Amino acid sequence: MPSIHEKIRAARVRRGLTQLEAAQLAFISHRTYQRIEAGGTSPTADQLERIAAAFGCSVSDLSAALGENTKRGGKKTHSR
């Protein structure tokens, strides 16, 4: 199953957006968006909602993979 980071990247590419454009549409800093897409950090619930809105899709479209990596208390955790 693709990770949340891969799903976000795929959604952006399908819409023909650059990372900068996606970040601007989601009201997220460009660097933060880059880290999310690269897997360096997991998006917060708020960021995920804004990314989904920017891409015109639902959070559930992007979050099916959230069981793998979720952000809690600023740390990346892995489900068991």
Image (cartoon, helix red, strand yellow):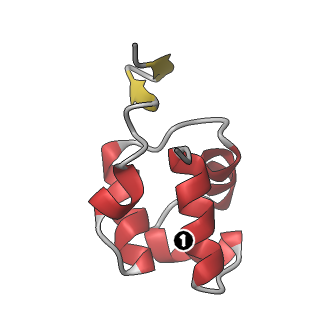
Q: Residue at x 71, y 46 (%)?
A: 38
Q: Is residue 41 visible?
A: yes
Q: Return the residue nearer the eye: 68 or 30.
A: 68
Instruction: State whether residue 79 is above or below residue 49.
Output: above
The quarter of the rendered structure image containing the C terminus is top left
| Mark 1 secondary-structure assignment | helix
* 56 left or right of 21 in image: left
Q: Which residue is mark 1?
A: 11
Q: Amino acid at mark 1?
A: Ala
* Residue 41 image point, x, y percent: 58, 36
- Judged from this view, the residue extending furthest toward the front is 1
Q: Return the residue nearer the eye: 8 or 45.
A: 8
Q: How many marks?
A: 1
* Residue 68 image point, x, y percent: 46, 30
Q: Residue at x 51, y 60 (%)?
A: 28
- Judged from this view, the residue extending furthest toward the bottom is 16
Q: Residue at x 49, y 77 (%)?
A: 25
* Residue 60 image point, x, y percent: 28, 58
Q: Return the residue nearer the eye: 30 or 14.
A: 14
* 37 left or right of 52 in image: right
* 70 left or right of 7 in image: left
Instruction: State whether residue 63 is above or below residue 68.
Output: below
Instruction: State whether residue 47 is above or below residue 41.
Output: below
